[in-house]
Image (tube, helix red, strand yellow):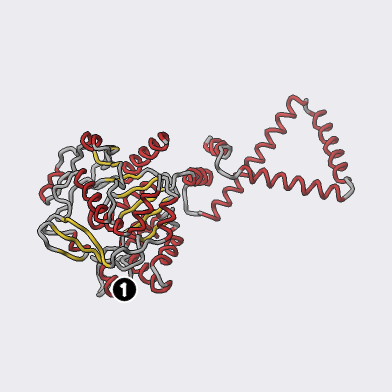
């Protein structure tokens, strides 16, 4: 029964297999016909005579009411058996360790190839969480990642080797990987011991080494994408070594992404050195062809806004006619977004754009979490200074924002309050489909 179902699946449109099988069959028939014509049609006469003799003999043994269906069933059975064994051999050669049947893999590939062109902008764990969910809906995903990180393993490699910080890029590559889980786990493996190695992840070292070999991080990412069979592409926001700075409400100025995340006073303005870093052509091309542009989720001042310090990216987003969606965090971040609700996050984005001389909204659609129920985990977060990001949906809609609220945390209990990849991606795709119908 299972084999019969899978045989029927091959008849579904979009697999791009039947047309080539038919083309091959037609080509074989024409080749045989050409050879027969070349031989003065004698092979055709022989075949017709043999076939006439065979049909006459077999219909004398059994009536045609039995012979016809029997021969047809045998023929169909041989075709299905031959095709099944052929595709089985192809799958064994291409992916011997995968459990998914070839027809299912082709159906999934066909569906993903019809997916929208999605550009996701951000950094940190928020962006990688979003990507791991979106790759179920499209293979045309571009992740534009901040390169302002100066803490942890990325900061050490940045200072000692002079490379752009690879950490957020590594996470995005792993999130979009379709290769074996073991290879992805290797890329994400972090050394817990060893002089000089402790704290570094294998993927960070791999990307840094490839950057040194190929001459730049962009080429290293391309090579890593082939190794991990990445579904889509990961692009740095800029190839310049940028340093973040922030002006605080108390008049203090602090430098460095790792310091900004623990600001002692509310952040008023964000900037970088050098000013106006250039964008990569791949990022600009992806935005120009996008069907949907997403900002977030992620740390507001250290993962999201640094991307908007690249003027060419902002200009490309403004020119794009695709829907633009901002995804807000579940919780505030102590030292960075204390006391900010969804409106406060949006105002921070608009204030940053105003500093660049842009007075129009870049993201007029917002996706936020439904009210979180009281739980022991939530109380634990509150003790550490984090609060749920409240969403005044009615007020935001009055101000002209398109607000969507959904259970983005997911239904399963978790040890940490983070977006659930599947729930987040589902909400994003529902937003996209609703706006595609409207357009």
Instruction: State the image coordinates of residue 183 (x, y, percent, origin top left).
Output: 40, 60
Q: Residue at x 29, y 70 (%)?
A: 158
Secondary structure under the numbered disc 1 in the rendered image: loop
Instruction: State the image coordinates of residue 400 (x, y, percent, origin top left).
Output: 27, 37
Image quadrant containing the C terminus: top left
Q: Disc 1 designates what residue?
A: 162
Closest to the observer, 179 or 208: 208
316 relative position to 49: left or right:
left
Q: Residue 429: which quarter of the image?
A: top left
Q: Residue at x 35, y 42 (%)?
A: 428
303 relative position to 321: left or right:
left
Q: Residue at x 16, y 64 (%)?
A: 254
Closest to the observer, 329 or 361: 361
- Answer whether residue 178 is visible to the viewer in this image: no
Instruction: State the image coordinates of residue 206 (x, y, percent, origin top left).
Output: 37, 68
Q: Is residue 135 above or below residue 64?
A: below
């Amino acid at each position: 029964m299972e084999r019969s179902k899978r045989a029927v699946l091959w008849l579904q449109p979009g697999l791009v297999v039947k047309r080539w099988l038919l083309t091959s069959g037609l080509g074989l028939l024409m080749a045989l016909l050409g050879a027969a014509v070349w031989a003065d049609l004698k092979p055709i006469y022989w075949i017709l005579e043999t076939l006439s003799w065979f049909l006459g003999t077999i219909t004398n043994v059994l009536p045609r009411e039995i012979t016809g269906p029997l021969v047809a069933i045998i023929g169909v059975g041989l075709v299905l058996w031959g095709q099944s064994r052929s595709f089985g051999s192809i799958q064994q050669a291409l992916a011997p360790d995968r459990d998914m049947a070839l027809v299912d893999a082709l159906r999934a590939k066909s569906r993903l190839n019809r997916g929208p062109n999605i550009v996701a902008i951000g950094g940190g764990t928020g962006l990688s969480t979003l990507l791991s969910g979106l790759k179920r809906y499209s293979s045309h995903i571009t992740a534009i990642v901040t390169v302002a990180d100066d803490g942890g393993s990325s900061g050490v490699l940045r200072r000692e080797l002079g490379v752009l910080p690879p950490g957020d890029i590594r996470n995005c590559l792993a999130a979009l990987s379709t290769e074996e889980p073991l290879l992805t786990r290797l890329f994400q493996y972090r050394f817990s011991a060893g002089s000089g190695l402790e704290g570094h992840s294998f993927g960070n070292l791999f990307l840094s080494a490839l950057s040194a070999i190929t001459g730049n991080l962009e080429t290293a990412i391309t090579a890593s994408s082939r190794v991990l069979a990445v579904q889509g592409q990961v692009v740095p926001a800029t190839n310049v070594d940028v340093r973040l700075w922030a002006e605080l409400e108390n008049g203090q100025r602090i430098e460095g992404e790792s310091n900004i995340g623990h600001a002692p006073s509310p952040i008023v303005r964000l900037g970088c050195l050098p000013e106006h870093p250039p964008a990569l052509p791949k990022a600009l091309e992806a935005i120009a062809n996008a069907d949907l542009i997403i900002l977030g989720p992620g740390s507001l001042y250290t993962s999201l806004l640094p991307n908007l310090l690249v003027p060419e990216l902002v200009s490309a987003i403004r020119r794009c006619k695709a829907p633009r969606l901002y995804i807000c965090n579940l919780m505030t971040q102590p030292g960075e977004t204390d006391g900010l609700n969804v409106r406060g996050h949006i105002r921070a984005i608009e204030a940053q754009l105003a500093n660049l001389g842009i007075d129009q909204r870049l993201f007029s659609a917002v996706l936020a979490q439904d009210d979180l129920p009281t739980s022991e985990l939530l109380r634990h977060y509150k003790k550490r200074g984090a609060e749920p990001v409240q969403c005044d949906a009615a007020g935001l809609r009055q101000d002209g924002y398109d607000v969507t609220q959904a259970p983005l945390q997911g239904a399963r209990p978790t040890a940490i309050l983070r977006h659930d990849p599947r729930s987040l991606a589902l909400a994003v795709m529902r937003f996209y489909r609703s706006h595609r119908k409207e357009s």
